[in-house]
Structures are given as structure tokens and as C-alpha cells.
Image: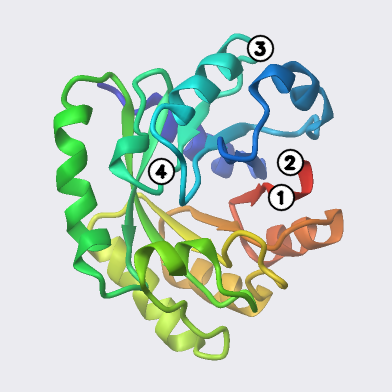
Amino acid sequence: MEDTFYKTLLNNISAKKKQLAILIDPEKFTNAEAAVFLKKIPNETTHLFVGGSTVKNGRTNETVQVLKAETNLPIFLFPGDYSHITPLADALLFLTLLSGRNAEYLVGQQIKAISKLKQTALQIISTGYILIDGGNNSAVSKVTKTEPLSQQNIEEIVHTALAGQYMGAKLIYLEAGSGAKFPVNGAIISRVKSTISIPVIVGGGIKTEAQKQAAYRAGADMVVMGTAFE
């Protein structure tokens, strides 16, 4: 299937249009209030991401279903586990946890997902996922049993992002983790953006307009905000 959602993302970048995704965690989201929630998110929102590290079986499917009934925004799955995949979404961020060394999240979960993905029309977008220290013990660290990369070690982060591109990733996602005390530093975003040639998504710890704009200025092609709207 033609990757129309990925091409739209690239076209927006070419047109200098900054993109904003609102991350919805099915475990924290009240499906009955979907319409009210969607009225509260910023007008410039371009995407909805749905996913979380510890989502009970079936919750993602239910959340995507109610969102689909209320909005035309593209819905991308951002799964913490292969069991969270639902064919009701538009696209899937096919994540590889590049910052960790746990084989389960480098290739194990991806293989487990295939039997589900073969039966869907989801547009699959290979995404290099890099967890960066946001000042807290994030759910991603706990679930994947991996340590985030230090914000002080910019060179390692840049090399990890470039390795992801060389391995075939179509996106690089710099993530400070859910509930991060501080977001990914602008210096890191700038270095990664200037080194790789694929889009850069930045999320985790971005709670204010100032933080969002700072990420854009540093080079983020898409900013992901979540906690601020839950």
C-alpha cells in the first residue's frame, strides 16, 4: 500500500509546516469523553498518537474506535507491546528501541507483531525510537528494562540516530519519557536534525507552548504532547 500518511508528513516538512501530535494513552483516557477531549486540543494538531507502555488488552482498539467516530485527524499507533495493535488505526509507528540493548524491543516484539500486521491495511512506518533521560524513571524504562541515554552524551545520541537511519528507519523519535521532568534539550535536537536526513519527532516532558516552540526552533519536525491534555 502507498505510504500516503508518511508522504503527507514529508510534504508538510517541505512546506515548512510544523506538525503536532497529541498522544493519547488508552489507560488514562476516558472514551466516553472523546468528543470533549478533542475540542480541547490545539487547533494546529495534525495527528493523534494512541499508545502507552502498559495498556490492557483491547483498550487501544476501543479508544481508536471512539476517536475515529469523532475526528478526521490521522490516528497513528504508538504501541508499547505488539498486542496493542489494532487494524482500526491509520498507521503504525513500527518502533525499534535503538537506545536499549534488550533484544525483545530490538526485534522480538517486531516479529511477534507480524501475524497481526499481515492481516491489516495499516500503513507501517519504521521508526527508530531513542529514549533519553528526562529526569525520572519512565514507564518505558521499567517495561523494557533499559536505561535512557544521558542528555550530556550528545555524540552517542547522534550516532544512535544515524545508525537508525542507516538501518532503514523512516523516522527518528527522540523521547524523554512519559511524565519527564524536563524535555529533550534543544542542543540534542539540533545536532540530530543536522546529522540525519529523515524526519525528527520529539516528545516527553513538553507541557507548555514555550517548550513546544523551543523544540520546533531546534529542528523538530513534529512535537508530541500528551500529559498536558490528559
Q: Which secondary structure, mark 1?
A: helix
What amino acid is found at the position of numbered circle 1 in the picture?
Thr
Q: Residues within 10 Å of mark 3 (few under 14, many from 20)?
A: few
What amino acid is found at the position of numbered circle 4 in the picture?
Pro
Question: Marks 4 and 2, Cα distance to the nearest angstrom?
Answer: 18 Å
Q: Tell me the tag on residue 227.
A: 1
Q: Which secondary structure, mark 4?
A: loop
Q: In the rendered view, does 182 fall on the left or right side of 173?
A: right
Residue that badge 3 annotates: 70
Identify the mark nearer the N-term, 3 or 2.
Answer: 3
Q: Relative to 229, does residue 88 appear above or below in the rendering?
A: above
Q: Relative to 100, does residue 168 appear above or below in the rendering?
A: above
Q: Tell me the tag on residue 79.
A: 4
Q: Residues within 10 Å of mark 4 (few under 14, many from 20)?
A: many
Most foreground residue, 129 or 67:
67
Residue 206 location (% of width, % of height): 72, 59
Most foreground residue, 115 or 151:
115
Most foreground residue, 100 or 20:
100
Question: Marks 3 and 2, Cα distance to the nearest angstrom?
Answer: 17 Å
